[in-house]
Image (cartoon, rainbow, N blue to C red):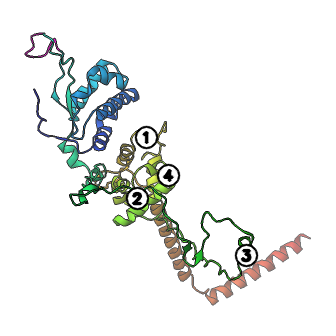
Amino acid sequence: MHKSIPPGLTTAQSLLLWYQVIAACPDAAHRRADWWRNTMNIVWVLMTHAGSDMVTKPWSGATWEKLAREAGVSRSTLADRLRWLRVHGFLSTLLSGSTPALRAGRRGLRDGLGNLAAQYALTIPEAVLEAMDPEERESLVPPVPEVVPERWEDVPWPVETLPVDVTRTPRVSPYVGERSISPVHAREGDQDRAPRKNHAPAPASSAPATPEPAWPATVTPVTKSQRLQACQRLRRDDPVLRKMPEKHLRSLLRPLFQAGATVSDVKHAFNVQPDGRPWPYTDDPRWLPGWVRWRVAAWADDDGTLRAPLPSQVRAEANRVRLLEQARRAERTAREQENRGAPDPVALAQLKVYLHGLARDTRRSRTALV
């Protein structure tokens, strides 16, 4: 008997969206690598047995034995991962599997159907979809292809022949602009080898196009177009980020950009933790969007609140303190020079008389000793 999808769940709009939501599940963060690897193998096998309606097909023979064999896991591991998917709302059982001996209404008699596979619906919790960024969700859902009528439908009826594809090689025109070319079957003669006197040289090509300037690494992008240029700079500098579309990357980096991050700050966040320790590197990310989201969440909340100051902010604060200290030092020097007036002439004359008398007394004492 077919069951309906429980409330609060909805059928996944695409296999890529379903895979990405599972990869970003917070419960998988503390799991071991082998647990996660077996889980994603089972997820992949379920995707290969699902149709366009995101429901596995019983006629494909996707029994537990076949699913476990294709995923390379045991039946107990398969049962545990299917339970995990159902608990988190990523899978809904529409039809339970059965055997001839235990099938309802058959009283243990064989009906010729053999073992019937269960039928699963690939689902996503509605709360998870509402929490996702709209641009990110749209990038994971392929557009609906436009229905294009067949060529024969455009031909009026009745007809004697239908249009066929042309398979012959088209004739190449012997003239290209102002320059003529010889037919491909013509043999080159001696006169063809000689330089043509009246042949005008090919027009000089225009100046080579200069590459579009990249977004500066030390400037904070503010608008959506500026953030898109910053993501283009990141994809150009980092080969790992080239695997992700620039609009998807802009959506994931929005918390950092809202906090005032530059391209250099984003690179720092991808390589260094907020406490200053480097991120451990073992292998390429299994799922790049989840990896980027995890690194960004370690530095900033969804609303752009930073957990630690960014390197550009640290440098800006140090520069502000340095300029403030220089201004205070210049003000103190100017005040001292202002208070330091011209010497009093009377006091200067008295000082000269005193020093002159002191020198005279010193000479007398030396003469008396001799």
Name the amino acid, label 2: Ala
Query: Label 3 to label 4, Cα distance in Å?
Result: 50 Å
Q: Could you classify mark 4 by the number of other residues whose Cα lies within 10 Å: few (under 14), some (14-19), or many (20 or more)?
A: few
Residue range in magenta is 100-108
Task: Indicate which disc, 1 or 2, sits on the residue closer to the N terminus.
Answer: 2
Q: Is residue 74 above or below residue 299?
A: above
Q: Can residue 184 be seen in this view?
A: yes
In percent of width and height, residue 157 lies at 21, 58
Residue ranking furthest to the front: 160
Task: Indicate which disc, 3 or 4, sits on the residue closer to the N terminus.
Answer: 3
Residue ranking furthest to the left: 105
In percent of width and height, residue 187 lies at 67, 65
Query: Label 3 to label 2, Cα distance in Å?
Result: 62 Å
Q: Nearer the viewer, mark 2 or mark 4?
A: 4
Q: In this view, does 111 lie above or below 24?
A: above
Residue 195 is labelled as 3
Residue at the spot of label 2: 261
Residue 238 is labelled as 4
Q: Which of marks 3 and 4 is in front?
A: 3
Residue at the spot of label 1: 285
Query: Label 1 to label 3, Cα distance in Å?
Result: 60 Å
**Left or right, 298 with reference to 84:** right
Query: Label 2 to label 4, Cα distance in Å?
Result: 17 Å
Task: Indicate which disc, 1 or 4, sits on the residue closer to the N terminus.
Answer: 4
